[in-house]
Amino acid sequence: MFAAPPAQAPAALVAMVDIFIPDGDGPGAVQLGVPNNVHAWTGTHPKLTRLLAKTITWLDREAEKLDAKDFSSLNEGDRNALLTRLAQGVEGWEMQRYLLRLRAESMTHYYADRRGWAGLDYAGPPQPEGFMDYTQPPSRE
């Protein structure tokens, strides 16, 4: 079955995911295309689509109060502060739960990509190679 490529994520979603998983020891979520994958996932659930729009509207409105064009044009500190307010439930439980779900979904998409393991000192799952020393007694190494 052919899967359509993920839709282009809105700039505010890209900015949110960039706060969740910035680049550092490894590539950030934006470099791995996580915002587009999360946007495609959101699009499969009408309620999540509505909550994304509601969240972006609120973030953009708050950004305008800070003399910014929109949420994505804010500096990292201001973006982080607004997301922290949402995570604390200042704007109600619905957007709070959505933001936490969005963050969890971003993490899932990020770590599902082997390139996201770069800063973890993790070589990957033991399968399909398995534990080649399984016939040996356990060691303390």
Image (spheres, grey):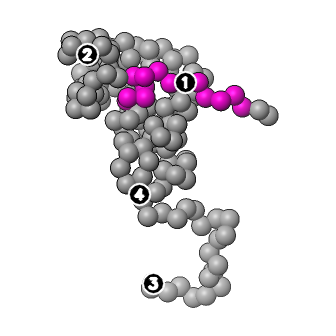
Write the residue at 62% across / 82% down: 133
Mark sitting earlier along the chain (2/1): 1
Measured Cα–Cα span from mark 2 to mark 3: 55 Å
- Image mark count: 4
The residue beneath circle 3 is 141
Residue 16 location in percent, x, y? 37, 29
On screen, residue 77 versus residue 129, left or right, reads left
Q: Which residue in the protein does label 1 denote?
A: 8
Q: CA distance from mark 2 to mark 1?
A: 23 Å
Label 1 crowding class (10 Å Cα cut-off): few <14, some 14-19, many 20+?
Answer: some
For marks 2 and 4 on the same chain, the one whose residue lies earlier in the sequence:
2
Secondary element at tag 4: helix
Badge 2 marks a residue whose secondary structure is loop
Check the picture and name the quadrant holding the N terminus: top right
- Residue at the right extreme? 1
Q: Is residue 14 in the magenta section?
A: yes
**Residue matched to label 2:** 68
Whether residue 95 is visible to the viewer of this picture, yes or no, is no
Instruction: Indicate which disc residue 119 carries.
Output: 4
**Mark in the foreground, 4 or 3:** 4
Query: Which element is circle 1 on?
Result: loop
